[in-house]
Image (cartoon, grey):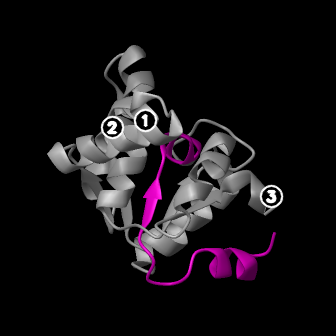
Amino acid sequence: MSQASLEKAIPEGDRILLDTSALLAYLGVPAPTTPLVRHVIDEYVRSGRNLATVSMVTVMEILVRPLAAGPGPEYVHVMDFLQRFPNLRAVPIDLPIAQEAASLRAQHKFKTPDALVIATGLAAHVGHLVCNDAQWKSRLSAISTRVKVLYLEDHLPF
């Protein structure tokens, strides 16, 4: 997949939600999608081309590995990324997000963590959910007028 086709898939100015799999690949958990995620975050988000949203569920999930290893450089790196990376915002879960998540669970049978992540993106009015979860792509087709799913593996090789 070329850079031009990725730019077409994520139009300039669209807000994006980065799910846990995308951030883990970016922060050092090797994955086939790592170069693609690095491009999206380092080129699109850092520059402000696309503002990024992260759910507090994702924040919790990406902190598990560094905390399990014991406080150290990896934990500091992840916290620094979350607190200081330009154009990236972690969104707290509030009542409207919880209501949207409940609706997603009722209609599409998502597990609670996934429903909360997706609902966070919807509440933040993102144009794309950037993920590596094939189930999101098929399950969310019913709400494709509200948000599109950018399934990373569809854009490999990069």
Q: Residue at x 47, y 53 (%)?
A: 18
Q: Residues within 10 Å of mark 3 (few under 14, many from 20)?
A: few
At label 3, the amino acid type is Leu
Mark 1 to mark 2: distance in Å? 5 Å
Return the x and y of residue 5 as percentages of the image width and height.
74, 78
Look at mark 3 in the image and give the residue it sits on: 156
Look at mark 1 in the image and give the residue it sits on: 105
Query: Looking at the picture, does residue 60 appear above or below residue 148?
Result: above
Is residue 101 in view from this perspective?
Answer: yes
Residue in the foreground of this view, choosing between 76 and 137: 137
Residue in the foreground of this view, choosing between 111 and 32: 111
Q: Residues within 10 Å of mark 2 (few under 14, many from 20)?
A: some
Look at mark 2 in the image and give the residue it sits on: 102
Left or right of residue 56: residue 68: right
Q: Residue at x 59, y 35 (%)?
A: 29
**Viewport quadrant of the N terminus:** bottom right
Mark 1 to mark 3: distance in Å? 30 Å
Query: Looking at the picture, does residue 95 appear above or below residue 155?
Result: above
Query: Looking at the picture, does residue 29 appear above or below residue 123?
Result: above
Return the x and y of residue 119 as percentages of the image width and height.
36, 49
Return the x and y of residue 34 as percentages of the image width and height.
66, 50
Quarter where residue 39 is shown: bottom right
Return the x and y of residue 31 as percentages of the image width and height.
70, 40
Left or right of residue 132: residue 70: left
Q: Residues within 10 Å of mark 1 (few under 14, many from 20)?
A: some
Mark 1 or 3: the one toward you: 1
Quarter where residue 69 is shown: top left
Q: Where are the magenta residues, as a range?
A: 1-25
- Kind of element beneath mark 1: helix
Mark 3 or 2: the one toward you: 2
Q: Residue furthest left?
A: 95
